[in-house]
């Protein structure tokens, strides 16, 4: 089970974004390598550039008991997010918290298919992981 919520989205409290999550994928934090080698270097040297928080893509069922109400894509205000993996009971799961922007939202469906959707969040902070 996974639940994703928005915290501080202007409503004053946590809002459940998706009830029927099909998948969540996180790309992870990356940083560019800046080559600082000079002609007399005998070993290649480098420093790390700006960190990129990565992205989170959430796929969900858009109909049924699931609720889909993400912040609007293209908003210039970062939103705090929490993803809870495992049981909602205390002591039985992992919570990943971060801030970010919704950069993409899409829906699909067809004959004899469920209506599904997805959205991508660009993380603007390093995620914190809490195992409870």
Image: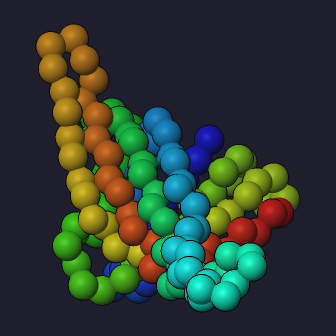
Q: Looking at the image, which residue sits at the far left?
A: 111
Q: Indicate the position of residue 85 as horizontal and vertical percent values.
A: 66, 51
Q: Tell me, yes or no, if residue 92 can be seen here.
A: yes
Q: Is residue 21 above or below residue 68?
A: above
Q: With 110 as the anchor, is 102 left or right in this view?
A: right
Quadrant location of the C terminus in the rendered image: bottom right
Q: Tell me, yes or no, if residue 125 can be seen here.
A: no
Q: Indicate the position of residue 32 as horizontal and vertical percent values.
A: 52, 74
Quadrant location of the N terminus in the rendered image: top right
Q: Looking at the image, which residue sits at the far front?
A: 40
Q: Nearer the viewer, residue 51 or 11?
A: 51
Q: With 56 as the anchor, is 1 left or right in this view?
A: right
Q: Residue at x 67, y 88 (%)?
A: 40
Q: Indicate the position of residue 61 as horizontal and vertical percent values.
A: 35, 36
Q: How is the rendered protein coloured?
A: rainbow
Q: Residue at x 22, y 68 (%)?
A: 72
């Amino acid at each position: 089970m996974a639940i994703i919520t928005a915290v501080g989205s202007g409503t004053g409290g946590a809002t459940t974004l998706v009830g029927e999550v099909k998948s969540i994928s996180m790309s992870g934090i990356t940083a560019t390598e800046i080559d600082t080698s000079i002609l007399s270097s005998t070993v290649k040297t480098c420093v790390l550039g700006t960190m990129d928080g990565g992205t989170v893509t959430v796929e969900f069922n858009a109909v049924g008991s699931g609720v889909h109400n993400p912040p609007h894509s293209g908003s210039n205000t970062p939103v705090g997010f929490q993803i809870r993996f495992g049981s909602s009971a205390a002591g039985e799961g992992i919570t990943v918290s971060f801030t970010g922007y919704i950069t993409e939202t899409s829906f699909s469906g067809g004959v004899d298919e469920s209506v599904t959707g997805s959205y991508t969040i660009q993380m603007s902070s390093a995620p914190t992981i809490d195992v409870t």
